[in-house]
Amino acid sequence: MSDSQRTDPATDPVSAPLPRWWSRPAESVGAPGGPVPPPRAAAHADPHPEPEPEPDPDPVAVPAPVPQWWSRPAEPAGAPGGSVPPPRTGPQTGAGPDAGPDAGPDAGPDAGPDAAPRYDPWSVRPLQSVDHGKAGSRRIRLRQGIVLGLGAALLAGGIGGYAGVLAERQAGTRLELPQAAPADGGRAPDSVAGIASTALPGVVTLHVNGAEGGSTGTGFVLDGQGHILTNNHVVHGARTITVTFSTGESVAAELVGGDTGYDLAVVKVDGVRGLRPLALGNSENVKVGDPVVAIGAPFDLSNTVTAGIISATGRPITAGGDKGDGSDVSYVDALQTDAPINPGNSGGPLLDARAQVIGINSAIRGGDGGDSSGQQRGSIGLGFAIPVNQGKRVAEELMRTGRATHPVIGVTLDMEYSGDGARVGEKGEGGKPAVTAGGPGARAGIGPGDVITKVDGVRVHGGDELVIKIRAHRPGDRLTLTVLRGGRERTLEVVLGSANGS
């Protein structure tokens, strides 16, 4: 070839410019013969390369533009005539003109003390960089993060636990357990609660002061004028009487009248509005087993309500007799109940399922003996009430006249007789005849020494029972008496007379 001959880069594969992703800068040689490109050492080099042709003495090299990030400076040949630098087989570090004394021969122009190594695609093995210092720092930071995390977790747990303890202590004062919602409060009228609700406004507690001391009893309102029925033994010998209503209001009361034989009395209050009289029932309708409710102030515990049944009817009892002359003895054909009745219940109402008064609580059968002061013991389930029919009649008489009348047959009984039945005495008090002349007994044909065994077909076992059976009726009532005379029974009819009571 001549000197002017040029190789067409487009057709000559040797001199054609390489693609940009693998082009390399032209390398100058020191000999005037022109540059000789160094052999390319690559991982994929041909194991049997062909000998390269001798270079053109006057080539015109047109180096392809090289990207700045991987350009390399031309390396001068070490000897005149241009020697070929040895191929590079290891990793290369670029160092520029400002590189330090330790910069390698291939340092690039932009390399500095902190310059990062450049990637060389012609290198035998990939560029690898290991920064042990940074990895160590990361491990230290990881350990620190774990320690800090654990510390934060422990701190948060402690704070949370302490806050929980405080919350629990504070919540302890506001502890609320499950509870049923408030009900309307209504009860069936025939239940104990319904009966008590109806009757309590008409029940009162009496506090009495007398010459022998104070006592407590119970009573109930009879009408809107302020009349109150109670037991005679509650107010007997009273100097002052105070009545306390279920509302707590207390007023003074005056005695209207009382009767020892029936153990009933009436007191009256004035100037009290809104009185609630109790309805009166009929004691003849009472049957054994009927439910009953008793209201009173046992041991001064006002408005105490107890419940039970009627355990017997027509039970003859006597109460009182403390004077020894019989003037204070009460004869009652009583209703017997197991509703608890105690001292202080005296005079209170015994109510049926309709909240109607069927009896007036009057006496109890206590346990045998008593305490050291002689006081009666509490209830053992044997309480006695005056039938309301008898109480009504006596109360009406006391309200009208202040005194009550007693039905009588006009005979004197032998209370010492120990046989069965009630025996008519031979002599009366003060030597008078035992059978009052012209009296009810004399008109019926009763004579001294007769033994009365039945009243209206009901057996009597003693004089007390006969009195009780007669007093259970009104004056003018007609009775049938069974009389034993000379070993023979006969039946007599008697119309009850009247006598003033005590």
Image (cartoon, rainbow, N blue to C red):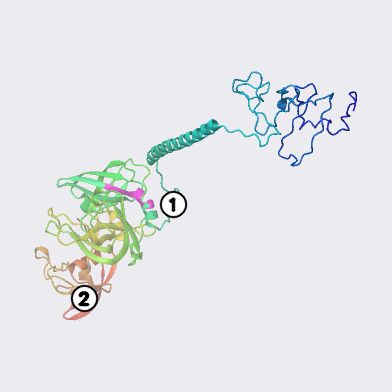
Q: Secondary structure at mark 1?
A: loop
In the displayed structure, 372 sits above or below 333; it is above
130 lies left or right of 324: right
Looking at the rendered image, the quarter that the C terminus falls into is: bottom left
Q: Which residue is mark 1?
A: 186
The CA span between labels 1 and 2 is 56 Å
At 29% from the left edge and 66% from the top edge, which residue is drawn? Answer: 313
Please, which residue is most extreme toward the top here?
98
The 10 Å Cα crowd at callout 1, few under 14, some 14 to 19, many 20 or more, is few
Which span is picked out in magenta?
Answer: 197-205
Does the CB distance between marks 1 and 2 fall below 8 Å?
no
Q: Who's the residue at 31% across and 64% down the image?
A: 310
Instruction: Residue 483: give its label.
Output: 2
- Closer-to-camera residue (59/262): 59
- Disc on the earlier residue, 1 or 2: 1
Q: Position of residue 63 (x, y in %)?
A: 80, 25
Name, please, the residue furthest toward the left.
431
Residue 204 within the magenta-colored segment of the rendering: yes
Image-quadrant location for residue 474: bottom left
Neighbour class for label 2 at 10 Å: few (<14), some, many (≥20)? many
Q: Residue 57: percent from the left, percent from the top?
A: 84, 25
Give the residue type at disc 2. Val
